[in-house]
Amino acid sequence: MLLKRLKGWELPERAVTSESVFHNRRALLKGLAAGPMILSATALAGCSDEASAEADAAKQLAAVPPDPSSHLYPVKRNPAYADGGPNRPITDPDYATSYNNFYEFGSHKDISRAAQALKIRPWTVTLDGDVAKPKTIDIDDLLDQMPLEERVYRHRCVEAWSMVVPWSGFPLSALVKLAEPLSSAKYIRMETFMDPETAKGQKQHWYPWPYIEGLTIEEAMNDLAFIATGIYGKPMPRQNGAPLRLAVPWKYGFKSTKSIVRFTFTSERPVSFWEELQDSEYGFWANVNPEVPHARWSQASERPLGGGNDRIPTLLYNGYAEQVAGLYKGMEGERLFT
Ligand code: MTE
């Protein structure tokens, strides 16, 4: 495969839009965080260039159709996942909904505006491959069938920033049960939508679109593996992966694939998007480990979003070892932490 220099993750930290830039635009970002709404002209007043850019953004937001699942939220918080742990407060939603990785909409953090173009209805989810009977389900029918709950999870990006967010959604195990996999199914391959006209990043032909991720069936059945359909008590904003995304908090964030359209049950280990692009740096397992550095930077500590440049130590399996370490017994020869 032809490998062009990676964007985004190859950039030094200083080249990535800083948190302060986002912070200074809180009024606008609040609009994006809340989902489609019309921002008032007074809320957008500023210097003239900014005012006209923000007026354009306001027009764009006004055109975004509302999320038809709004009535389902908020949902009850699961007491087993009630908070982010000691000294890990919930991240300000302005940060979590504006400092994003979603390469379909650009290889930088500031994609929240572009992502408003994502059409989230109609949206179907296909369950196929090694299953009793392939199914394609409308997202609203799926949401009606699934046991929705809220869970506060830590999220650790491979780039060494992190956040703590209340996801709404359902355990991935419930979807696996619905799919009725055959005994030959050892893995689940998850596929993101493909629509280069809407998601202009998908026109960047050096990336192996669509975005693919994978888990073993055992990982998918672990209680922590979650399909998130909302955040902060509201439907999932487009920039965070509406209408449904994965949340596997013991793994680096790139495993938590967004805007999924297909779950394929298979006997073959899926090759994921970043693995296909650069397998020396991004592997299949991608479990968080502070002692195994990335090829180009340390993973020993992380920068919580909203905390300026303050860093905190990174924990093995992002602090979820008790729940997941058993999944990897006897696999010492594998690249579990890349
Ligand atoms: N899923 C898709 N389809 N495309 C992406 O670019 N980025 C991943 C992951 N899921 C990505 C994706 C990475 S690197 C991270 S850290 C998280 O999404 C970021 O999720 P957030 O923007 O909600 O914080």
Image (cartoon, grey):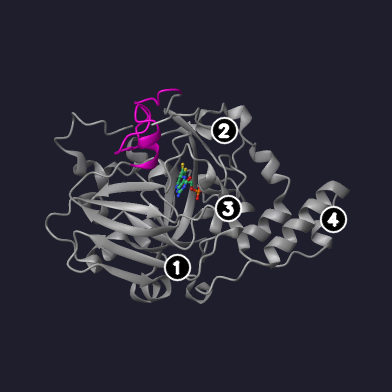
- Tag 3 secondary structure: loop
Circle 3 residue: 97
Cα gap from disc 1 to disc 4, whole angstroms = 36 Å
Q: Quadrant of the N terminus?
A: top left
Cα gap from disc 3 to disc 2, whole angstroms = 20 Å
Q: Earlier in the sequence, mark 3 or mark 2?
A: 3
Residue 120 vs residue 250: left or right? right
Q: Earlier in the sequence, mark 3 or mark 4?
A: 4
Circle 1 or circle 2, nearest the eye: 1
Q: Residue at x 27, y 56 (%)?
A: 264
Circle 2 residue: 310
The answer to whether mark 3 is within 8 Å of ligand 1 is yes
- Tag 4 secondary structure: loop
Circle 4 or circle 2, nearest the eye: 4
Q: Earlier in the sequence, mark 1 or mark 2?
A: 1
Cα gap from disc 3 to disc 4, whole angstroms = 22 Å
Cα gap from disc 3 to disc 1, whole angstroms = 22 Å
Instruction: Check whether the beta carbons of the residues at disc 1 and disc 2 lie within 8 A of each other.
Output: no
Q: Is residue 286 magenta?
A: yes
Mark 4 crowd level (few <14, some 14–19, many ≥20, 10 Å Cα)? few
- What residue range appears in magenta? 272-296
Instruction: Check whether the beta carbons of the residues at disc 3 and disc 1 lie within 8 A of each other.
Output: no
Circle 1 residue: 123
Q: Main secondary structure of the magenta part?
A: loop
Q: Amino acid at mark 3?
A: Thr
The location of residue 319, given as percent across then percent down, is 35, 41
Q: Amino acid at mark 2?
A: Asp
